[in-house]
Amino acid sequence: MLWNCKPQARAFRYVGHKDVVTSVQFSPLGNLLASASRDRTIRLWIPDKRGKSSEFKAHTAPVRSIDFSADGQFLATASEDKSIKVWNMYRQRFLYSLYRHTHWVRCAKFSPDGRLIVSCSEDKTIKIWDTTNKQCVNNFSDSVGFANFVGFNPTGTCIASAGSDHTVKIWDIRVNKLLQHYQVHSGGVNCVSFHPSGNYLITASSDGTLKILDLLEGRLIYTLQGHTGPVFTVSFSKGGDLFSSGGADAQVLLWRTNFDGLNCKDIIKRNLKRLHFDSSPHLVDIYPRTPHPHEGKIETVEINPKLEVIDLQTSSPPVMDILSFDSTTITDTTVRTLADKGEEINSYFLNPSLLSSECSPTTSKKKTEDTSDFPSESQRSIPLAVTDALEHIMEQLSVLTQTVSILEQRLTLTEDKLKDCLENQHRLFTAIQQKS
């Protein structure tokens, strides 16, 4: 569902997935919305009244997580088929898979510079992947529980994990060291989100609370009670002045922070300066030397705003159901029918590739609606729908080819292990015969 809270609360409900939607995220420019589902598919939506979408199929099990790279060119998906898959958004194609986890992968996130991917799995490991050579370059393991969620801090030097064992851990990936360990929840932690400054971390837990941690002082400063059941997700806004949370009580709560006001563009510029691996790491990346607004406060503040906020659920905001259709099913008759009705054919949807990161949101919107740059069907030797269908077939064939190669590798490994087992069994049998 896509909400617009100003000037009047209203929402668009996009219908297309055939099972539970597990994750959603806007692209960096905001011109695309990605969603993952237990129906094993990923969809890219154009967030407008038409609700058009493209569907990606490659996973063989429910998809648990999606994440855009900071430049919007790539999408990482994590699935219960024990794999992470990376997609090219410009060409709408599957690129490669990452296989090293031995159990369901719950989450996968890009680093701010896009060079790394962090993933967590129910095999009780957190892995760091290099997107250049597609190799696992680091591994953090936990003997107690597994991580439900992982994410990079704004500088890309640390990762935070939300544990099923009620803990929150922060790791420094430069020195492979556990920096901070918090055990402030009485239930499993489902999600975490860094404040854009990197000084604060908010957590969502199955105990029904949200907690804000002060990373400078290493302590809990706020406990937020507003949900009436487990809280599954939480996320800061780009500027850090707001954050939202969602839980099992079927409510989305929008919160306002009392932290220092930050300019989103300034934060991005400042963090990009720290992303070059040539410069030696410094502790100010995680402990910045800035004045702290909470000095002298030792106690934890508990906040329960449930009776003080406007409940938009009871006021019945208007909700518009929008039925989507897949880009791969567009036919010539469909295109001509839309054109006859005077509606603009959104070429951005027919091939919903990302624009240059230098474009502003306003220019991207104009290019989205402008079809003059694309040749009309009368100028094409092949109808547009046929071209799209052929491209989709080629993409699926490439996916099948890579899947077959992966299966061949696994079969080879299985055969090697079977040979080793037979040899060991033969040796044991020989040793037993010699002893007897």
Image: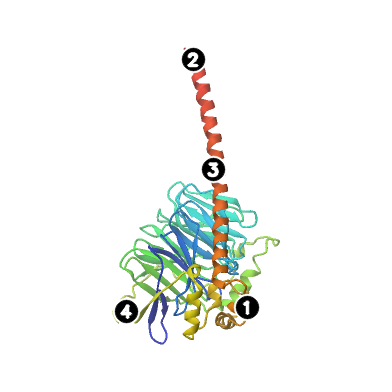
Q: Say few, some or many: other residues with alpha carbon within 10 Å of mark 1 (under 14 / 14 to 19 / 20 or more).
A: few
Q: Crowding near pointer 2: few (<14 within 10 Å), some, many (20+)?
A: few
Which one is in front in this view, the residue at disc 1 or the one at disc 2? 1
Q: Could you tell me if residue 219 is visible in this image?
A: no
Nearer to us in this view, 221 or 392: 392
Which residue lies under the disc numbered 1? 379
Callout 4 amino acid: Asp
User: Which residue is painted at 51% across and 60% down in the image?
Assistant: 77
Q: Residues under labels 1 and 2: Cα distance?
A: 81 Å
User: Looking at the image, is mark 1 or mark 3 earlier in the sequence?
Assistant: 1
Residue 379 percent across, percent down from the top left: 62, 78
Q: Earlier in the sequence, mark 2 or mark 3?
A: 3
For the N terminus, which image quadrant? bottom left
CA–CA distance in space, label 3 to label 4: 53 Å
What residue sits right under mark 2 in the picture? Answer: 433
Q: CA distance from mark 2 to mark 3?
A: 34 Å
Image-quadrant location for residue 412: top right
Spot occupied by residue 324 in the image (x, y as percentages of width and height)? 43, 72
Q: Which mark is residue 311?
A: 4
Of 405 and 308, nearer the camera is: 405
Alpha-carbon span between mark 1 and mark 3: 48 Å
**Secondary structure state at the residue bearing disc 3:** helix
For disc 3, the marked residue is 410
Q: Amino acid at mark 1?
A: Gln
Instruction: Give the spatial CA distance, label 1 vs label 4.
Output: 54 Å
Question: Of the residues under marks 1 and 2, which one precedes in the sequence?
Answer: 1
Where residue 288 appears, x then y in whole percent? Answer: 59, 68
Question: In front: mark 3 or mark 4?
Answer: 3
Task: Farthest residue to the top: give it.
Answer: 436
* Residues marked 1 and 4 touching at CB (< 8 Å): no
Quadrant of res 132: bottom right
For marks 3 and 4, the one nearer the N-term is 4
